[in-house]
Image (cartoon, helix red, strand yellow):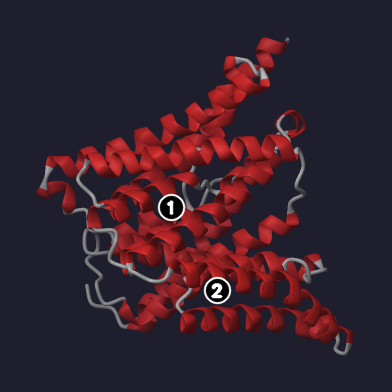
Amino acid sequence: MDLSPMMLFALILFIGTSVSYLSKRFHITAVPIFMILGIALGPFGAGIENYEGLSFIGDMGLLMVVFIAGLEVYKEEIASAGDTVLFCFLNTIISFSAGVFIGYIFGYNAYTSMLIGSILISSSVGIIIPLIAGKEDLRSRFGFLTPSVVILDGLSLFLLAFVIEMSKGSSIINFLAYSALFIALLLLLLPKLANKFFMRNTRSAYELPFVFMCLASFVAIAELIGLPNILIAFLSGIALGRIITTREVYDEIKAIGEDFLMPIFFILLGMELDFSVFAESLSNFAFTASLILILMISKVAAGIIFGKIKRYDRKESFLIGSIFWPQLSATLAATEVAFAAGLFDDVVVVAVACMAIVTSLATPIMVEILAAQKKNSEK
């Protein structure tokens, strides 16, 4: 099917707006639906292939995915610091090792295997935080869950950037120095400069344009000096969250990102998936199934070990691990970056996409079942 860029843009906007509205009304996760509809539109569905003209908008959606994840870090209170550090440590070690192992078993090189490991560290902020927020007993009993998911997302993105720079043969010392400089600039200087700017201007009139100007500027500078743009977008979200003082502006940013740019990114990502890799070799299907299984096992293992240390019962430990199953926005964004860097092939991209769809749909159901069992056992 041959559509002009404007016709395709209008179609994607219609799909994005409709799915976003319905997902909020019926309290379901929109991202897997975007990807499935993207697959239906692409070469393996309706046969639409001329979507290159929308690639820049898709790239902006990619940045908004991790930028909004960064905003969520500042919006959430960091509580239960000791438990948070312990769980993040266990999750990182086990998930990273599992990813490296699965990559090695299927014949991928060290860099690709480490990137798979770094991706398995993260979990979906967009699914887990609302899931926890809707269950008062989980929030009160396991206060470390929310801060853990945002910390693991940030750590995953940093490891992604670190491994990509290693694969290029870049100076690790320079990378760490530039990263430290940017973190200091973003987290320390930017809020102070922003406050001075807003003291001299009408905050309501300039806050939103200023936020997007800062995001674009720092990402552009990062690209000039060779730092990964999604890492800087994530850090920008953390820093700019400190100057977004009104709920109205925060909601406007999320509306532009989640209801406009992000649907375009995920629909285009679905259109780009090459499912013909499954027909090429049975091992490609085996890799996808193994990746999903090893993710679930590693998260539950971290939950069980953490539960043993903190003396939770078996059901509580399994519940903690399964909450961290969903791999969605940050995972898919990182996968796209790794693919662009030439470190992921079509097999890995399709496997991660399948993992994102399966875990994002299965996790809420599993958590509801386990939470209900926990309540019944307490009666």
Eyeballing the image, is 99 above or below 376?
A: below
Q: Is residue 329 left or right of residue 188?
A: left
Eyeballing the image, is 150 above or below 3?
A: above
Q: Nearer the viewer, residue 283 or 60?
A: 283
Q: Nearer the viewer, residue 46 or 238?
A: 238
In the image, which is nearer the foreground, mark 1 or mark 2? 2
Residue 181 at x, y = what percent?
62, 73
Residue count near mark 2 (Cα–Cα under 10 Å), binned few <14, some 14–19, many ≥20: some
The disc label shown at residue 178, or none: 2
Q: Residue at x 49, y 68 (%)?
A: 173
Q: How many marks?
A: 2
Residue count near mark 1 (Cα–Cα under 10 Å), binned few <14, some 14–19, many ≥20: many
Q: Can residue 25 be seen by looking at this rendering? A: no
Residue 17 at x, y = what percent?
53, 65
Q: Residue at x 57, y 46 (%)?
A: 127
The disc label shown at residue 33, or none: 1
